Amino acid sequence: MTAHTPFLAHEASLAPLASRYVDVDALPWKPTPTPGVDMKILLQDKETGLLTALFRWAPGTTLDLHEHVEIEQTYVLEGSICDDEGEVRKGEFVWRPSGNRHIARSPNGALVICFFLKPNRFLQGEHAGKALE
């Protein structure tokens, strides 16, 4: 099986079809290539690009222009994120179709859970031309 949770205690000892119970508080926050955005990976399959993760946005963070290669889903747990189309706040959900392009911002900080089928492709900034998780 290629799907897994990085840093999940005892994952290697689980049977292939066993449920994975994840103690999210025990997972480390890891920096992303975007300063001000850290993540906890809850589920990842590097072969397919599938990713479920918590993202913690520091106040004032901007995510460079990027394209969602496949559908992306975001539920806001705290704070808000926005772009030129609108703002999604605590308790709200947004999903973006394949091909959607935007610059995301979090003026006051946010905690979100995101679901990706494929990594974003960055179109501007330091990571332009790269697909990053």
Image: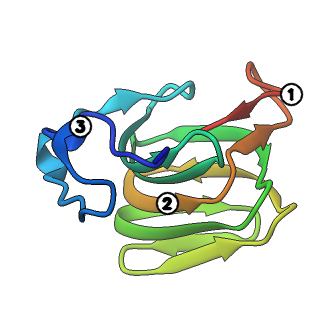
Is the Cβ of the residue at disc 3 closer than 8 Å to that at disc 1? no
Number of residues whose C-alpha sits closer than 10 Å to that of mark 2, classed few (under 14), some (14–19) or many (20 or more): many
**SS of the residue under disc 2:** strand
Residue type for callout 3 = Ala
In the picture, measured across the screen, residue 21 lies left or right of residue 38, that is: left
Q: Quadrant of the C terminus?
A: top right
Q: Is residue 26 above or below residue 42?
A: above
In primary-sequence order, the first of circles 1 and 2 is 2
In this rendered view, identify the residue nearer to me: 133 or 109. Answer: 133
Q: Which residue is mark 2?
A: 114
Task: From this view, report whether residue 7 is shown above or below residue 25.
Answer: above
* Residue 49 appears anywhere in the view: yes
Residue at mark 3: 12
Reply above or below: 49 against 37. Answer: below
Q: Nearer the viewer, residue 84 or 121?
A: 121
Tell me which residue sits at (24%, 62%) in the image.
Answer: 18
